[in-house]
C-alpha cells in the first residue's frame, strides 16, 4: 500500500514538473525545467555616493545581424519558443507588462498605452472590404481581422544607464528600456509599397519589469540545444551586437542621425564608443 502511495505521489510531482516546464513529453527525453523555473538575478545595490560619473546611452540593435538572430527568429512561435517581440507582446496581453508611448520626448515611461494603442502601432485591427456573394452575386461587406505585423520589427532601440562605480572601480551598464522598431516600405495612395523605407518606434517597455518573463524563456543556441540561456541572460551578459545611437546631451537628446548620415553616422557611433572607453580609463586610480 505504501509503495502504491509513493508511486502516485511521484507521478503527481512529475506531472506538475512537466506542467510547470511547459514541455511536450513526446518531444523531450528529459524534463526541461532549468529556464522555465529560473528567476532573474537581482541587481546589486548602488549608493549615489559611489557613482562618480554617469551617462544615458541609446543603442540600436539590428536584429538582422548574425549575432542578434536569436532575438528575431522564429518569426512565428514554435511550440514554447518565440522571438523577443512576440514574447513582449505576450507579456503585455497576458502578464500585465506595461507598454509606454514613444511620443514622450524624454522616454521617461510615463504615458502608458492601452492594448488598442499597441495594436494600432502594429497596424492591427479590423477592416471592412466588399466582395461578391457567390450565392446571390451581390456585393456584401466582410470584416477582416488584420494581425499585428510583428515580422516588420527588425530593430530595437535600447536605453541604458552607464555609470562608474568607485566602490568596485568598474564601469557598469544597466538597461532601462527597450523599444521595438518597425522597418517597412511606405505605401502610396493605392496601397502599393514604395521604395521609401520607414522606421517607426512602436512602444517602450521598462526592462526591470520584463526581466521575470525574459528569464523564463529560452534563446536558441545554434551550437548546443541542451545549453540554452534565457533572454535575460542574453541581455545581462550583453551578447548582442549594437551601435550607439545617441548620448544624453544639451541638445534635447538629439539622435546621431539628426546631424550626420550613412557611414559618417557609424563613424560617429564609434567615436562615442571610444569616448566611453577613455572615460572609464581616466577614472581609474593608480
Image (cartoon, grey):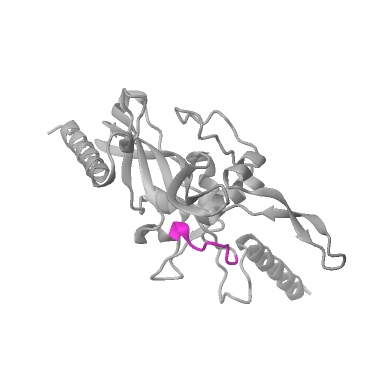
Magenta part of the chain: 70-79
Residue 141 visible within the image: yes
Q: Nearer the viewer, residue 206 or 189?
A: 189
- Residue at coordinates 51% horizontally, 39% vertically from top-left? 204
Dominant SS of magenta comes to loop
Residue 38 visible within the image: no
Q: Is residue 210 left or right of residue 175?
A: right
Q: Is residue 77 left or right of residue 223?
A: right
Q: Nearer the viewer, residue 145 or 155?
A: 145
- Residue at coordinates 32% horizontally, 30% vertically from top-left? 55
- Residue at coordinates 68% horizontally, 63% vertically from top-left? 16
Residue 163 falls within the magenta-colored stretch = no
Indicate whether 193 appears above or below 206: below
x%, y% of residue 34? 52, 61
x%, y% of residue 56? 35, 32
Image quarter of the N terminus: bottom right
x%, y% of residue 93? 65, 47
Amino acid at each position: 500500500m505504501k509503495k502504491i502511495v509513493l508511486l502516485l505521489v511521484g507521478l503527481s510531482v512529475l506531472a506538475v514538473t512537466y506542467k510547470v516546464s511547459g514541455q511536450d513529453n513526446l518531444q523531450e527525453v528529459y524534463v526541461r525545467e532549468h529556464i522555465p523555473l529560473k528567476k532573474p538575478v537581482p541587481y546589486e545595490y548602488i549608493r549615489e555616493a559611489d557613482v562618480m560619473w554617469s551617462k544615458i546611452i541609446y543603442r540600436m540593435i539590428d536584429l538582422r545581424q548574425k549575432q542578434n538572430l536569436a532575438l528575431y527568429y522564429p518569426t512565428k512561435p514554435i511550440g514554447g519558443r518565440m522571438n523577443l517581440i512576440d514574447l513582449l507582446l505576450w507579456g503585455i496581453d497576458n502578464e500585465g507588462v506595461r507598454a509606454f508611448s514613444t511620443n514622450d520626448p524624454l522616454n521617461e515611461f510615463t504615458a502608458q498605452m492601452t492594448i488598442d494603442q499597441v495594436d494600432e502601432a502594429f497596424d492591427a485591427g479590423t477592416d471592412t472590404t466588399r466582395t461578391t456573394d457567390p450565392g446571390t452575386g451581390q456585393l456584401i461587406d466582410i470584416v477582416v481581422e488584420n494581425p499585428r505585423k510583428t515580422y516588420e520589427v527588425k530593430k530595437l532601440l535600447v536605453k541604458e544607464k552607464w555609470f562608474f562605480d568607485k566602490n568596485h572601480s568598474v564601469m557598469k551598464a544597466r538597461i532601462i528600456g527597450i523599444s521595438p522598431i518597425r522597418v517597412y516600405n511606405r505605401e502610396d495612395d493605392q496601397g502599393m509599397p514604395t521604395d521609401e523605407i520607414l522606421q517607426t518606434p512602436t512602444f517602450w517597455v521598462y526592462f526591470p519589469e520584463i526581466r521575470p518573463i525574459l528569464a523564463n524563456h529560452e534563446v536558441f543556441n545554434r551550437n548546443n540545444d541542451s545549453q540554452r540561456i534565457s533572454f535575460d541572460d542574453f541581455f545581462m551578459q550583453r551578447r548582442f551586437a549594437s551601435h550607439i545611437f545617441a548620448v544624453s546631451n544639451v541638445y534635447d537628446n538629439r539622435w546621431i542621425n539628426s546631424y550626420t548620415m550613412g557611414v559618417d553616422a557609424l563613424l560617429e557611433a564609434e567615436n562615442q564608443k571610444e569616448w566611453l572607453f577613455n572615460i572609464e580609463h581616466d577614472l581609474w586610480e593608480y
